[in-house]
Structures are given as C-alpha cells and as structure tokens.
Image (cartoon, rainbow, N blue to C red):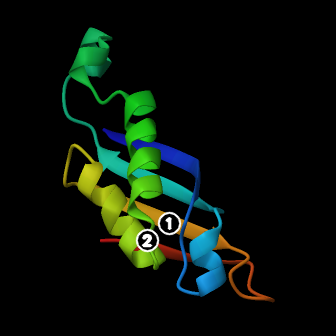
C-alpha cells in the first residue's frame, strides 16, 4: 500500500540569486511512499505513518535548510521520511520568466 502526500505548500528561502536568499518563496512538495504496518486491518494510527505529523516535519526541515537548489530540497525531504521506498517531487514556480514551473523528483 502507498501513501501520497499531495501539494504540501512550504514558504521557505530557496534559490541561488542574492534576492532569493532574502525572501520566502513557495515551493510545492509531493511525496509517495510505501506504507509499513497493518493500518488497513487494524484501523489504528500507530500501525501506519501519521501524515499530519510528517507534513509538519517536511515543512520544518525545508524552512531550516534554506536550500539553494530544488534538487537539495528534495533530498532534505527524502531524509526526513520514515521509509526509503519513496519518491519526492519538489516544484518551484515563478523562478524564470515564461516558465510555469520546474520540478525535480528524488531519487
């Protein structure tokens, strides 16, 4: 069974240019991970991943990291996940005129 966390919005410092280092920008994080446990049978949160708590940890880690690159942001998120069978997508909008968004997927 998989868990997908869709469109986690994070306002954080991200970017290489000097003006980007001095302001918050919104990035969007999507996570897909393999669920451990037996929550489908037990209906007990202790048998699964608490996605509210995980979403909070993801936001906190990105705010603290102040990444320059979305590639690094994806790795920061991956490192806080409780399982390794996972994929992280980080999307940044508005970085380049005429480009809707850029997304990186890790790993």
Give the side of residue 101 with respect to residue 62, left or right.
right
Q: Position of residue 54 (x, y in %)?
A: 37, 37
Q: Position of residue 84 (x, y in %)?
A: 19, 54
Residue denoted by label 2? 67
Q: Which of 2 and 69 lies nearest the eye of the viewer?
A: 69
Give the side of residue 106 with respect to residue 62, left or right.
left
Q: Which quadrant holds the N terminus?
A: top left
Residue denoted by label 1? 90
Query: Quarter-wise, where is residue 94 in the image?
Result: bottom right
Q: Are marks 2 and 1 in contact (CB under 8 Å)?
A: no
User: Residue at the location (24% across, 16% down)?
Assistant: 46
Reply above or below: 66 against 60: below
Say what secondary structure mark 1 lies in. strand
User: Residue at the location (59% across, 87% down)?
Assistant: 17
Alpha-carbon distance for marks 2 and 1?
A: 12 Å
Reply above or below: 76 against 93: above
């Amino acid at each position: 069974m998989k868990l997908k966390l869709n469109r986690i919005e994070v306002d954080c410092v991200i970017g290489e240019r000097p003006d980007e280092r001095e302001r918050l920008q919104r990035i969007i994080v999507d996570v897909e991970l393999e669920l451990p446990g037996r929550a489908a049978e037990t209906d007990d949160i202790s048998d699964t991943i608490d996605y509210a708590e995980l979403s909070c940890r993801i936001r906190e880690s990105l705010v603290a990291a102040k990444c320059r690159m979305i590639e690094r942001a994806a790795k920061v998120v991956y490192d806080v996940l409780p399982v390794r069978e996972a994929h992280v997508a980080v999307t940044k909008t508005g970085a380049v005129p005429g480009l809707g968004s850029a997304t990186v997927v890790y790993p």
